[in-house]
Image: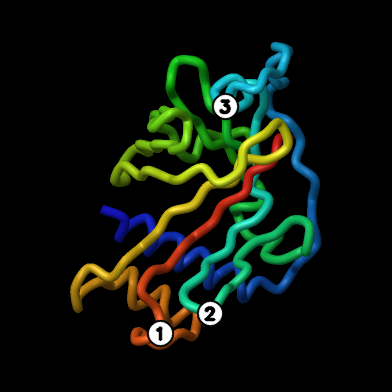
Amino acid sequence: MRKPFLLIISILSIGLMTSCNESITPLEKVVPASSAKSTNSVKQTLLNSFWQYGEINIQGGSKTKLVFSRQQNVGLNNTISKIQINFKTDGTIVSLQEGLVVQKGKWKLLNNDKQLELAIENSPVEVFNIVQFNKDVIEYNSVLKPNGSQDDAWTMTLAFLGASPSSVTEITTTYKLSPI
């Protein structure tokens, strides 16, 4: 179920690691964020702003690779640095790049707001564990475990990390989003 998603992330990660221009260009809001007052509710916080990726890292065993970070100027030349995410009240999600819709789908919170389900068009449904959540950051992760000898996503991610299969039992990809 996670193979295509992790394959895409692996390919993006390799592109991010080999980017040559690390300068950051601030994003401009495509549409003004909602003026609704912030509450402690996870759902309300999601709906109060457009979000952008702040950091992505992959960990397997003792190996960790920082794939993207605005704060540390890593991978800023990649497409992911320009993506704006909008969680809508009707349960839809839209990713924008330079004002154009590049992905759309549905989102919902599960397990007492401890998990985030994303059903992006033409991709398998993904369920992420929410690690940290407040008005300044959404941090969530996914865990990949080996799924047999023909698991391309597992093999590619291990190679990207530079980890041996015997030293890794699971790979965790962590995403941090910040409001725009």
Q: Which of the 4 quarters of the picture holds residue 118? A: top left
Q: Around disc 2, counting alpha carbons within 10 Å, would you say few (fewer than 14), some (14 to 19), or many (20 or more)?
A: few
Residue 152 in picture, x, y percent from top left: 29, 72
Q: Which mark is residue 16?
A: none
Q: CA distance from mark 2 to mark 1?
A: 8 Å
Identified by mark 1, the residue type is Ser
Q: Quadrant of the C terminus?
A: top right
Residue 13 in picture, x, y percent from top left: 53, 67
CB under 8 Å between discs 2 and 1: yes
Give SS at disc 1: helix
Read off the residue under disc 3: 42
Q: Is residue 81 left or right of residue 4?
A: right
Query: 178 above or below 147?
Result: above
Residue drawn where x is 68% and y is 50% of the image: 54
Q: Which mark is residue 167?
A: 1
Q: CA distance from mark 3 to mark 2?
A: 32 Å
125 or 166: nearer the eye? 166
Give SS at disc 3: helix
Residue drawn where x is 65% and y is 71% of the image: 19
Q: Which of the 4 quarters of the picture holds residue 151? A: bottom left
Give SS at disc 2: loop
Identified by mark 3, the residue type is Val
User: Of label 3 and label 1, which has the lower sequence position?
Assistant: 3
Q: Around disc 3, counting alpha carbons within 10 Å, would you say few (fewer than 14), some (14 to 19), or many (20 or more)?
A: some
Read off the residue under disc 2: 62
Q: CA distance from mark 3 to mark 1?
A: 36 Å
CB under 8 Å between discs 3 and 2: no
60 or 149: nearer the eye? 60
